[in-house]
Image: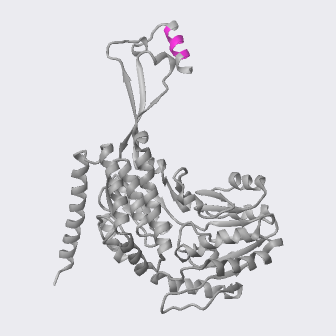
């Protein structure tokens, strides 16, 4: 029988072996050529296409995901990232010349050169085990890094099929974090994010944290209620039963349209459909939260089924703001709706809480929409839609404060996994007075004039 010492040695050997292989590969320069990076994206796209049906089956078996969600959200977003970098990588890696002061132009040139950071550790997340393993992986490869991907153990079937990975339990990850990496990317919750930052401080390892938060939706009285609910419902329920970092967490609705909003939301839910399966570890705690505010339930679309981990959508109306369900993130099929007298009250409520991943605003008043952009702080703002920001390669995706640090997608992923190195070149056969001590008043005056410009 293996002892704890034997298991610890086996674990250390496994981690050290993976790191040694990644480090030696990176040091050979194999990951740097443009052609090599593009070849990885083409191979990844081919692999996704060849095994698409297997991924469908695995995601359904692990998480109850439909073919639509598995293809549209997980597979297609990875393919889109590959396509973006196949098209744009040559431009991204090209050194960028930059301005120098006029008095240095005859002898000096300056440019910014993006270089890979080295060995990147990517922690995936259980709710999108394929997407949140491969999308950061693509961005890290884009920048020329060697990558180790650690999937979360909840999605067991997925972890063995997606890519070459380093599997570890949550307890083993504490050991993994003792090793030095050049960058860590993690999709998780704020409490785990704090543990990672504490662990990486020893090595001064930079981190990008994609955390979760309570993303609000503001419903103005001017909006088209039917349209807004049909755009909200899929983002909240169809995508992984609300177990999504960009899912709306609570609604702030103008008092004048509350009744019509709730009726339209119920209709939108019936029309949209949803995948009601929850992660096993979530169900009990979620039911406890719901029991604490049972008097606030406005309507529910069905009974919960603990045995099969099924919870139907529950809409709450004006739950106590001090309740745990309004303090903790609820990325599941529960949606609190709070009534507000006016939009100023809604903005004040959002500003009084930790910064979320996203703020969603539904209105036909563009002045009000601009006010939301200017007066709230969040990872992103979406006007008259929900979740649209995630699939765009042209804007950064990430949080701020309690909802994360750093961003990726498109060129922002390239930047996240690169170090921008400044390079200054001075001609070897030229000398300028600026390189020598200036003792005369005239020369000092010339130097001051140059520096001021």
How far across and how far down the image is residue 386, in percent? Answer: 63, 64
**Residue 161 in the image, given as x and y percentages of width and height:** 32, 70
Question: Which quarter of the figure is the C terminus placed in?
Answer: top right
- Which residue appears at 33% of the width and 43% of the height? 34
Report whether 260 appears left or right of 399. right
Q: Residue lying furthest right in this view? A: 256
- In the image, is residue 442 above or below residue 408? above
The type of colouring in the image is: one colour
Q: Quadrant of the N terminus?
A: bottom left
Residue at 81% over, 72% down:
257
Can residue 197 be seen here? The reply is no
Front residue of 160 and 297: 160
The magenta stretch is 443-449
User: Residue 72, position in %: x, y?
Assistant: 50, 67
310, above or below 53, in the image: below
Nearest to the observer: residue 43 or residue 127: 43
Dominant SS of magenta comes to helix
């Amino acid at each position: 029988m293996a002892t704890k010492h034997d298991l610890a040695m086996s674990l250390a050997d496994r981690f050290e072996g993976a790191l040694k292989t990644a480090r030696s590969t990176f040091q050979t320069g194999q990951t740097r050529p443009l052609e090599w990076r593009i070849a990885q994206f083409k191979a990844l796209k081919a692999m996704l296409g060849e095994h698409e049906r297997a991924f469908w089956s695995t995601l359904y078996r692990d998480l109850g995901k439909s073919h639509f969600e598995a293809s549209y959200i997980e597979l297609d977003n990875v393919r889109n990232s590959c396509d973006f970098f196949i098209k744009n990588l040559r431009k991204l890696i090209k050194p960028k010349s930059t301005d120098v002061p006029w008095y240095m132009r005859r002898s000096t040139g300056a440019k910014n050169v993006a270089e890979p950071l080295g060995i990147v550790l990517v922690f995936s997340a259980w709710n999108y085990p394929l997407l949140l393993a491969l999308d950061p992986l693509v961005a890290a490869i884009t920048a020329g890094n060697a990558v180790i991907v650690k999937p979360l153990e909840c999605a067991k079937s997925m972890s063995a099929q997606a890519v070459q990975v380093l599997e570890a339990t949550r307890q083993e990850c504490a050991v993994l974090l003792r090793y030095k990496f050049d960058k860590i990317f993690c999709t998780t919750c704020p409490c785990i994010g704090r543990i990672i930052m504490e662990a990486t401080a020893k090595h001064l390892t930079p981190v990008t944290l994609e955390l979760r938060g309570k993303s609000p939706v503001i419903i103005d009285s001017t909006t088209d209620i039917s349209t807004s609910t049909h755009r909200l419902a899929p983002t909240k329920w169809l995508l992984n039963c609300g177990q999504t970092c960009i899912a709306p967490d609570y609604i702030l609705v103008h008092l004048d349209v509350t009744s019509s909003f709730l009726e339209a939301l119920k209709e939108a839910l019936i029309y949209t459909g949803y995948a009601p399966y929850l992660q096993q570890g979530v169900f009990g705690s979620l039911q406890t939260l719901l029991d604490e505010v049972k008097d606030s339930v406005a309507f529910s679309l069905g009974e919960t089924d603990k045995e099969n981990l099924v919870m139907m959508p529950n809409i709450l109306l004006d739950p106590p703001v001090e309740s745990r369900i309004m303090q903790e993130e609820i990325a599941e099929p529960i949606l609190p709706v709070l009534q507000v007298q006016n939009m100023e009250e809604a903005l004040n409520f959002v500003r009084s809480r930790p910064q979320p991943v996203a703020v969603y605003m539904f209105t036909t008043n563009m002045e009000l929409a601009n006010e939301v952009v200017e007066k709230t702080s969040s990872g992103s703002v979406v006007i008259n839609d929900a979740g649209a920001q995630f699939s765009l390669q042209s804007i950064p995706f990430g949080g701020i404060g309690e909802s994360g640090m750093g961003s990726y997608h498109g060129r922002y992923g390239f930047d996240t996994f690169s170090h921008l190195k400044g390079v200054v070149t001075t001609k070897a056969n030229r000398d300028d007075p600026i390189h020598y001590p200036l003792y005369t008043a005239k020369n000092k005056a010339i130097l001051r004039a140059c520096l001021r410009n």
